[in-house]
Amino acid sequence: MSIKLIAIDIDGTLLNEKNELAPATIDAVKAATAQGIKVVLCSGRPLTGVAPYIQKLGISGDDQYTVTYNGAVAQTVSGKILINHALSFNDYIDLEALSRKLQVSFQIETPDYIYTANKNINPYTIFESNLVKMLIRYREVGEMPRDVTVSKAMFVDTPENIDRIKPLIPQDFHDKYYVVQSTPFFIEVMNKEASKGNALRGLAAELGLEPAEIMTLGDQGNDLTMIEYAGLGVAMGNAIDEVKQAADAITLTNAEDGVAAAIRKYALK
């Protein structure tokens, strides 16, 4: 079957080693959309952090889609939400308490803000704020509104501290939530139903597509579910070993325009 939808991770995949959108990638994506293939950016970022790349790729309209917050939300590029798997306020309370026990910085992302209860705001929280174009709000736990929509929670710290706390997260948290390391300095925690693979599954059902008609590209652990779901899961040359082992094919690295190479090899007519 021909490819009718291409799902692409952003950081480490769509963007090159300079965190830029290369001309070859733009050209390949535009060639795919010109043939009627839907290109869906699938990211841990909120829509504010995805929108600049959607615009540069010329993707627009209520029949074009994106997956944000690592699959917690699937929506049209204009913002109409189709799937939304959020965490509750009680989940926030439990996860924030765990962060203090593990001695690691913590934040949540809502549709509008990044919230942290860490008075000394972690540099990686500031990095995330700049990356996704979202303001930070410092709020102690008792100041948080109980009706807050928590799209995802994040343990945020140096790679060394993230490596230290990763095996210390209790099994019951893994059982209750979708816990995944997205970068060396982020461990993300979401609703159990949230993942890039589940979001694509729901989107495919909405569009009447089979997995065999879907190609996915990614490089990190948070891409694994969509790599496994798609009929053609493609790992970047710079992907972690776990993603490469699960993939059906491996393309060039993001420094070598691997997304463009894969689109031209597997998707374009």
Image (cartoon, rainbow, N blue to C red):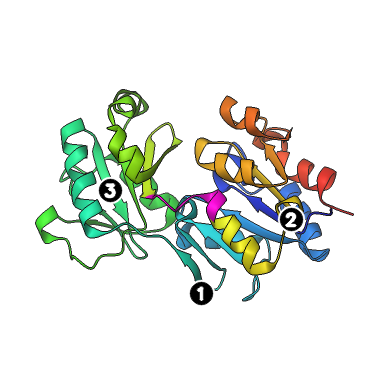
- Where's residue 65, x and y in %? 60, 65
Q: Nearer the viewer, residue 151 or 195?
A: 195
Q: Alpha carbon of mark 2 to alpha carbon of mark 1: how far?
A: 23 Å
Q: CA distance from mark 3 to mark 1?
A: 25 Å
Residue tagged 2 = 29
Q: Which residue is mark 3?
A: 107
User: Residue beneath label 1, please?
Assistant: 80
Image point (20%, 39%), residue name: 98
* Amino acid on which the number 2 mark rests in the picture: Val
Q: Label 3 neighbourhood size at 10 Å, few (<14), some (14-19), many (20+)?
A: many
In the image, the segment drawn in magenta is 191-198
Residue 198 rendering spot, x and y as whole percentages? 54, 53
Q: What x and y, as percent, mark residue 253?
A: 68, 33
Any part of residue 28 in sight = yes
Instruction: Give the image quarter of residue 136.
Output: bottom left
In the rendered image, residue 160, in percent from the top left (x then y), is placed at 33, 23
Neighbour tally class for label 2: few under 14, some 14-19, many 20 plus, Cα within 10 Å: many
Q: Is residue 199 left or right of residue 249?
A: left
Q: Residue 77: which quarter of the image?
A: bottom right
**Callout 1: SS:** loop
Residue drawn at the location 59% of the way across and 25% of the way down: 241
Measured along the vertical axis of the image, is residue 220 above or below residue 125? above
Q: Amino acid at mark 1?
A: Lys
Q: Is residue 72 magenta?
A: no
Q: Are marks 2 and 3 in contact (CB under 8 Å)?
A: no
* Residue 55 in view, yes or no: no
